[in-house]
Image (cartoon, helix red, strand yellow):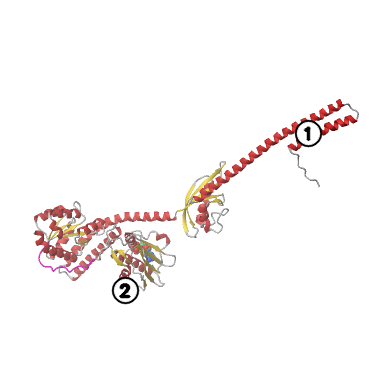
Amino acid sequence: MRLPVAPPTATARLWLAAALSVVAVIGGAYLLESHGYSWAAAALVAAGVAAGAARFLASSRADRRYAKVLENEVATQTRSLVDSLTATADAERRLRLVMDAVPDAIAVLDRDGRVIDLNESAKRLLAASPDAGTGRNVFASLEPDAAATVRERLSAAFRGEVQRFEVPGRREDNSKNLCAMLYAPVRERGEVTRVLALARDITDQKHTEHQLQQAEKLSAMGQLVSGVAHEINNPAAIISGFAQTLLLDVVKPEQREMLQMIYDEASRIGRITANLLAFARAGGSQRTLVDLNDIVRRTFALRSYHLTTLNIAVSLELSPAEPKFWADPSELQQMLLNLLINAEQALVSVETARTIVVRTVASEDEVRLEVADSGPGIAPEIRAKIFDPFFTTKPEGVGTGLGLSICYGIAREHGGRISVDSPPGRGATFVVALPRDPRREGRPLPEAPAPAPPATGTVTVLIVDDETALRNALLKFLGRRGIQGEGVADGGDALRALRERDFDVIISDVRMPGMSGREFLERLGRERPALVARLIFSTGDTFAPETAALIKEAGRPTVTKPFDFAELERVIRQVAADAARRRPMASA
Ligand code: ADP
């Protein structure tokens, strides 16, 4: 066995050369001498040996210098290699920190959709899939349609085109979401070798956008609807007025029946326009402290007979925790009525058990009203449209498409929201969540109207309305009831008429061309303050914010078009009686 021999170091070599020289000189001299050579020859040989040793020594020094240079070079190269490795590791670490700090998912994909690299958000986004991480395939967790889209977009990105698209997916908790994707080609030496994929969960953003669009659409629709409702209201009021006047006459029974029908239908138009205006209005409703359970009981009582005849079983699951809150009771009733009627209409189409559950739930911040039916439910493709005004799937004459849009308007007015849940085969559940807002000033419910003073004595009325036919209808009816009057088209004419003669009562429209009801009130207040107490406002839309504000500020009685003439007469006589009581003081 050969043992490895370590090469001599530079110093060892130096010592070796010196020792050899000395030994050679001494040895050479001795040998020469012993073989009979002269000292001169011996000296010559020794000098030769010494020269050889010196040369050996010189070459050994050059070797040493070269070795030193080599050593330094190796050390420098090693240092720079270590530095550059450290810098690369640092850069990679920083890049990773930056990637992980991005809330959007970032992944690098190869041509087959395999994940080569990904950040923390991408790991979370892909966590729904069992084989999340690098090496997995992005198509694995996608629905077939979404996977086809992604495949197509990825190929386009590998062709060098930047791709932006949206794709449905699933979150970590397996819930569905929608992602906005960006695929950017990564080029190396002019060739696309990888694709950088960015994904952002835009589910909430989409939802908010959708709500905003819905609100904008409804607000535009509201303006249109309110304009139409105003236009329809006046003719309806005129028809209703003449029908009521003719009903005062002694007419044949069949004529009476027809007149009554004309009056009923005109009143129906009035109710429809009131509904339209309720949907379109932006505020002005009266709030009071209401008990939601109470509203449910009362509204259910209105429909209970009808529900029984349709073989529909209703159960009321009312919250024991007193769901009281500030709201407009008549609007809440209207909302529940619409939901109940929809449930009824849905249930008549099913032969299986017909049930409706009305539930109230109260928490500290909100009250919830739920109406669940066991009907056919609502198909996903129309779910987004059912709150749109005029959207209906019911035959003509049955559906108007306004019920749910009114509910939407009422919920929004109360600062709440309405939603529907309809899993396949499990009917439909409408949920209305309304905040309990104690800051809103409530007003007590209007008290039952006082009985009208007896129809004695002559009462004179000034009617201010730009609709000639409506003024005539009113004057005719009132004339039959012993109330004399005069009609004028606007506030200016009214002030002139009041300068010429006295009227016990003034009925003024709120919305008139030229001088508005508010301006008329102000002018009357300045010129004839005593007459303000004789004023009654008439309006087709008590919900319009400016009308509601005027009525509230003026504190004057208001009659709504189309008029119920009997009610109008009662208010006129009441105001006339109050004015008569004040008269001595006013003239004093
Ligand atoms: P309308 O009842 O006049 O059609 P709505 O605005 O109240 O108008 O309702 C719009 C549509 O929503 C209905 O035509 C119907 O298709 C659907 N819908 C409402 N409530 C229900 C329900 N409880 N079950 C099934 N479909 C419903």
Q: Position of residue 191 (x, y in %)?
A: 56, 43
Residue displayed at 49% across by 50% down: 101
Q: Secondary structure at mark 1?
A: helix
On screen, residue 410 versus residue 54, left or right, reads left
Residue numbers of the magenta segment: 446-460
Residue 393 in sight here: no
> What kind of residue is marked 1?
Ala
Q: Which residue is mark 2?
A: 305
Q: Nearer the viewer, residue 298 or 273?
A: 298
> What kind of residue is marked 2?
Tyr
Q: Position of residue 329 (x, y in %)?
A: 29, 65
Q: Earlier in the sequence, mark 2 or mark 1?
A: 1
Residue displayed at 83% across by 31% down: 25
Whether residue 157 is in magenta: the answer is no
Label 2 crowd bin: few (<14), some (14–19), many (20+), radius 10 Å:
few
Spatial CA span between label 2 and label 1: 131 Å
On screen, residue 347 versus residue 508, left or right, reads right
Compared to residue 88, the image places residue 55 above or below, namely above
- Return the mark for residue 227: none
On screen, residue 256 versus residue 169, left or right, reads left
On screen, residue 231 versus residue 38, left or right, reads left
Q: Which residue is mark 1?
A: 18
